[in-house]
Amino acid sequence: MVRLKRRRLVSAVVVVTMLLLFYRVAHFLFGARGYDIMPDTPTPARSRPGTDIVLGQECSPFSSGLMDDVTVVLKLGDAEVRSALPAYLDRIARCRIDLLIFSDHDAEYNGYKIIDALRALHPEYKYQNPDFDIYDRIQAANGNAEKTEEGWRLDKYKFLPMMEITAHKRPESNWFIFVELDTYVNWDNMYRFLSRFNPKTPYHFGSPVWPKGKTVFAHGGSGFVLSRGAMNRLIARGRMFAENHLYPGTHLFGKPVSTMCCGDEVLAHVLKECGVSLRGYWPMFNGEKPASVRFGWEQWCESILTMHHLQDHDFDELKSWEAARKRPATPFTFEELFSFIEPHLIDQATDWSNLSEDKVFKAPQRAAKSVDHCLAACKRDGKCMQYEHFGDTCRLSYVIRLGHSQSPEGSTKWVSGWIKDRVQAFKADYSPCDGPHFVHANPK
């Protein structure tokens, strides 16, 4: 009996040691990207003489005037003006944000003018283009159109006219931050980030998408940034295609937008032709929300600029949690965000998907037979942090994710679990961080 306990103890020690060794080796092999430490208080390059740099308070970079040269550009659909815009404006009501709002129909809400990004577009782009059938219906509904999936077909046409109209309306702005309704931005970190760069230099920042054989582009929902230098180059190229130089947004820079997948890709093509390539700053610009972030060595000490896919309750819960941060004036990192989701990590949860996806077993493989077999497979794999079983499928994950509730589909039920001692071992090995990481660009 004593001998058996000793064997179990030795086995546990070996597993934990292998896990820690894996993360160390992985970090050495794949973590050579490099980083700087993001300071609590940036150098005063972007601050005005006599302006105190006060961070850690709600809207602090805006209320103190530190981001007076920044324009935030919000893109949405016409139906969202009524359904989602009110909550968004409530969240930023106390901030002095210079906000431009673009949609597919001219409107006004609570003192904000909503600009139809497509109104001035030359008829040749709309004529006999089925993508614009929904646009005609939106105009006919005069602000009362119902939200449909068809509205998404217009999105890719908005990007380039939106750039020209933004530059026309904000000739003095140095930075342009493009977001969507479900984009979270940590404004303190964004101020710290932008403070590192000269806006006169052409910059395009964001989270890179790497389509095979195509131009790398910034994921729109994660938010992206253009500097004044980049915007100037973009507008200069647009003059080659504009018939009316007095009014912006009449053309699509000669691009066959109808054949392209999405507006962020279209924009990246034009910027590349202007000599402005994307500088990728993932995971700081991030396409996940707290519950779906892949917490691991790549997303731990890194500073958070943006997240995506947040719903109203996500914004509310995160805001309340941020208000209780012990050191609010320090940069917000994934390590700290983990404490937001960690209380929800339990041994096993029914009717829950924790988004495990790194290794998949299907019937007739043994691990897929049952929840217990799936758990056993996870424990045998020294890299496995969590598992998920449903139907005849078992999935393992080498990172930590919270996930979401998942209702049964017929007789198929979802069960998820976390190997909590490995979660604690990971934390012990990687915390505390040597400081909030400001990752080096990839691509550069």
Image (tube, rainbow, N blue to C red):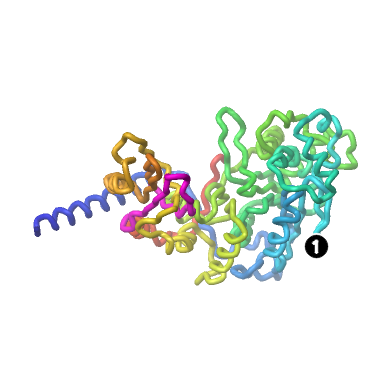
Q: Quadrant of the N terminus?
A: bottom left
* Residue 299 left/right relative to 82: left
Residue tagged 1: 110
Residue 116 counted in the magenta span: no
For the magenta stretch, what is the residue range? 398-422
Is residue 28 toward the left or the right of residue 199 in the image? left
Q: Residue at x 84, y 37 (%)?
A: 121
Residue ID at (72%, 52%): 80
Where residue 78 sits in the image (x, y, percent)? 76, 49
- Residue type marked 1: Asn
Which residue is most to the front? 410
Q: Is residue 10 above or below residue 358?
A: below
Left or right of 243? Residue 402 is: left
- Look at 45% across and 63% down and name the residue there: 339
Tell me, yes or no, if residue 171 can be seen here. Answer: no
The one nearer the camera, 114 or 332, is 114
The quarter of the picture where residue 120 lies is top right
* Residue 196 can be seen in this image: yes
In the rendering, at what x and y percent does residue 376 appear? Answer: 28, 47
